[in-house]
Amino acid sequence: MDWARENIRKLEPYVPGFQPKEDGFIKLNTNENPYPPSPRVKQMLGRIKGDLLRLYPDPHSDRLRQKIAEIYGFRRDNVIVGNGSDEILSIALRCFVGEGERIAFPHPSYSLFSVLGQIQGGEMASYELDDDFRLPPAFFSAGARIKLLASPNSPTGTLYPMEVIDRLAEESEGIVLVDEAYVDFAEESCLPLVRKYPHLIVVRTFSKSFGLAGARIGYAFAPEEIIQIMMKVKDSYNLNRLGALAAEAALEDWDYFRANVDKIKGERKFLEKELQSLGFYVYPSGANFLLVRDPEGRAREIYEKLLGRKILIRYFDDVRLKDCLRISIGTHEQIKQLLRALREILNGCSPSGTAGERKNEA
Ligand SMILES: *Cc1c(COP(=O)(O)O)cnc(C)c1O
């Protein structure tokens, strides 16, 4: 018996990055923040009384939306929050795409775009990025109910400057959704364009730059009319009380947030230089990860050997990302361990560090 709808039957589900059950891994595979969220988050959660969880949360999460709006110079009516930015993407597709209607996005990009689109029963239109991961002209002129673009893009790290998004919005009749999950690690955001275009949505998250991936809090900015449509479709209580409180506490510690982001950007620079000196090609990144290509085609082997040493990075089985590895920016200590392991692997040394060192001494 085929219980599932036809598009669900055919669906290849999204595969989240590996989350090991045991300890002892250096986890550089899912772009989590290597540092904990602001200590204020823990303090806030420690003060929680039982009644708080007995009652339903505010269905509109007004206090958090207000806080986000004030920080970024918008009105509360321009902000929606949700159970991670993934939920916000899902809400947008449910709002704006009907069965058989077109959803356009570049490739390679965030693979959840296509999965959510297929669940919705839309027609997927994917546009190949060029060798420098620039958008093809056809993406600008494409007709679609919605265009989805991650900037900085994942897994490439490419930031699409404001002028590119401006042109995209200018040339698109349907909704343009820019997923800025990594934008806090970049030098530029297209957020000001939300004031210019009636059909632009900018989606963000607390998962990466605020170190709150486990709390599942996403948010988006858009013109009021768009937000009203999305509020109609979202689950009544789509953000739980603990998530909302954690996000509010994190926003109150802006200095911690800035320092954390700056530290990661500094480590990104360090790792980039070191990887280049090992002979890798490092793509420009505005995110908390680097995409690197091994000109000698050993990416898969390197990935597997690192895995054997409990260092997790990402290898993509995708023709467009041939010989590429994606490495999340960890702490300085984690990056040093990664580089040590990489040097040994590239030298073809034995996996035991001591043997490698002895060889160097000889
Ligand atoms: C990590 C990521 C997200 C997911 O964010 P959540 O808020 O944790 O759901 C969204 N978009 C992109 C491009 C990401 O890499």
Image (tube, rainbow, N blue to C red):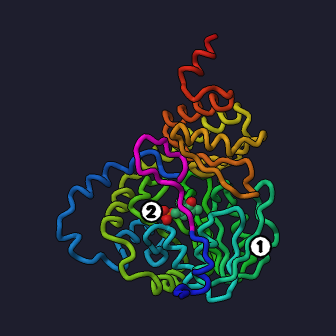
Residue on which disc 2 sits: 71
Mark 2–mark 1 distance (CA, rounded to whole Å): 31 Å
x then y, percent, for residue 90? 53, 76
Q: Is residue 29 magenta?
A: yes
Q: Residue at x 48, y 85 (%)?
A: 228
x then y, percent, for residue 268? 59, 41
Is 226 placed left or right of 20 in the picture? Answer: right
Instruction: Pick whichever, 302 or 53, lies toward us.
Output: 302
Label 2 sits on a secondary structure element that is helix
Mark identifier at residue 140: 1
Q: Residue at x 41, y 56 (%)?
A: 212
Instruction: Pick whichever, 270 or 62, lies toward us.
Output: 270
Amino acid of disc 2: Ile
Q: Is residue 146 magenta?
A: no
Q: Residue at x 34, y 60 (%)?
A: 246
Q: Quadrant of residue 302?
A: top right
Amino acid of disc 1: Phe
Prevailing secondary structure class for the magenta stretch in the rendered image: loop
Graded by Cα atoms within 10 Å as few (under 14), some (14 to 19) or many (20 or more), the crowding at tag 2 reads few
Q: Residue at x 69, y 44 (%)?
A: 299
Report the magenta residues as a range.
14-30
